[in-house]
Image (cartoon, grey):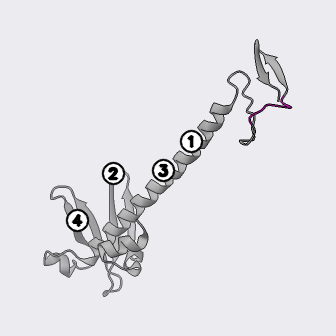
Amino acid sequence: MTTTELLNKYRVSSEQIDRCHRIEDHQLRQVWYAVESATKPGVEYKVIFDRKFGKLRCLPFTGEPCEASLEGTICWHMRAAACHAAEVRLQRIAEQERQMVELAKEMAAEARACPYCGHSEVVDPTSSSLDGVKFEVVNGRTCPMR
């Protein structure tokens, strides 16, 4: 999913996402967002996931409570925080996939290496012969020379 698709899904703008600041409290093992108010300078709201009720809550962080959350509606602060969290999750998945590809390449290179001497011979995939490759005996086994 692209960033544009996430913005459309959560009905927020990139400017609103820029107002979100992810806070990771390692001692409490909790992640929350400080979201700047668009209309009141200097006011921030704390968006948390309430485990007791299983939903997001927009709480006052610096200043007054969010008017929309007081009415019981989902405010843009919560939508922006949820969108940012989804974006972070997608970035972490992409990084894990990249690391898995790198690991698979390393494992494939190790699998091609000779188990006795560790030498890996790069063979032209269009060639099926070992012409010109010299061999030596290592630990009683015949291996390609380095």
Q: Give x and y (percent) for residue 130.
A: 79, 31
| Eye-nearest disc, 1 or 2 | 1
Q: Is residue 35 left or right of residue 113?
A: left
The one nearer the camera, 127 or 50, is 127
Q: Are marks 3 and 1 in contact (CB under 8 Å)?
A: no
- Whether residue 144 is situated above or below residue 39 in the rendered picture: above
The residue indicated by pointer 3 is: 96
Pointer 3 or 2: first along the chain: 2
**Picture residue at 23% right of the left edge, 71% below the top:** 59
Q: Relative to 125, is 51 above or below?
A: below
Q: Name the foreground residue: 8 vs 123.
A: 123
Q: Indicate the amino acid at tag 2.
A: Arg
Which comes before the other along the chain, label 3 or label 4?
A: 4
Q: Residues within 10 Å of mark 3 (few under 14, many from 20)?
A: few
Q: Which amino acid, by three-letter code, is at mark 3?
A: Gln
Q: Which residue is located at x 16 percent, y 55 percent?
A: 52
Q: Which residue is mark 2?
A: 29
* Residue 112 placement: quadrant: top right
Which element is circle 2 on?
Answer: loop
Residue highlighted by disc 4:
56
